[in-house]
Image (cartoon, helix red, strand yellow):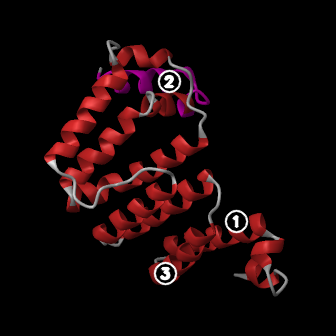
Amino acid sequence: KQGLAALPSGTPWESYFELTFGLYNELALCEYRSSLFQAADEHFQVLTTQAQTPQQIGKIYGETVYLHTTMNEYLVAIELARQGLARLGITFPPVVTVEILVEEFRHVKETLGNRQIADLLTSPVLTDPKKIAQFDILNMAIPSTWLAMPPGFAWCTLQMGVADDWLINLLIGRAEHEDDTAIDRTSRVAIGQ
C-alpha cells in the first residue's frame, strides 16, 4: 500500500504503468495470502482492466481465477477464465456440448498426426507469449471446471493439446532450467511412464 501511496497523484497508470501494475499485483497477492479476499479481488479487478500484454493478461486472469477457486466461487472463476481467454483469442463456450468435445478431440488427433506423445519431447520449446498466457489461464481453470462444469474441464484440457504441442513444450521448456533429473522426471510423466 505504501508503494501505491508514494506514486504521484493524477495518472500513475499513464505515467508509470509498469511500476503501478507491479505494485497493484503485489498488493493483490499479499492480500490474497493474508486472507483479505475481498480486497484482493478489488485489486485484481483493476488489474484485469489494465492488463495489456499477453503475459499480463495470462498472469492476472490466472491469479484471479485461482483466487475465486480457493474461495469456492467456481462459476465466477470459470467466467473470469472465459473473459481472459477471450482477450487472448479463445472462445470458451458457455455450454460445452458433446458435439463441441468431439470436434476438439478430432482437432487434437489432427494436431498430433502420426506422432506419438514421446515424439513431442524433441519439439522446440514454446516461446509464444500468447500461447503461454492462454495456458496459464486454462491451467488455473482446471480445478473450477472439474468441480462445477465437467464438460468445461474436458474442453480446457483439450485446448491445451491442440496448439502445436504447446503443453508438452511448455513443460519441457520450464523444466530445462532445472537439473537433468527434473527434465527426465517431466519427460516420463509426459509420456505416461
Tell me which label, 3 or 2, sits earlier in the chain: 3
Mark 2: which secondary structure? helix
Label 3: few (<14), some (14–19) or many (≥20) C-alpha neighbours in 10 Å: few
**Numbered tag placed on residue 121 in the rendering:** none
Q: Residue furthest left?
A: 98
Say which element carries label 1. helix
Residue drawn at 29 percent across, 23 percent down: 192
x then y, percent, for residue 97: 17, 51
Whole-percent x, y for residue 3 in the image? 76, 77
Label 2 vs label 1, nearer the camera: 1
The residue indicated by pointer 1 is 22
N-term mark: 1 or 3: 1
Which residue has dot 3 on it?
36
Q: Type of residue at label 3?
A: Leu
Between circles 1 and 3, the one closer to the viewer is 1
Magenta stretch, residue numbers: 174-192
Task: Give yes or no for contact between labels 3 and 2 (Cβ–Cβ under 8 Å).
Answer: no
Rounded to the nearest angstrom, the CA distance separating label 2 from label 1 is 31 Å
State left or right for residue 117 relative to residue 21: left
The question of residue 180 being in magenta is answered with yes
Q: Which residue bears the numbered disc 2?
A: 183
Does 190 appear in magenta? yes
- Classify mark 3: helix, strand or loop: loop
* Residue beneath the point at 29% across and 67% down: 74
Instruction: Examine the image and state in which quarter residue 60 appears.
Output: bottom right
Residue displayed at 65% across by 73% down: 24
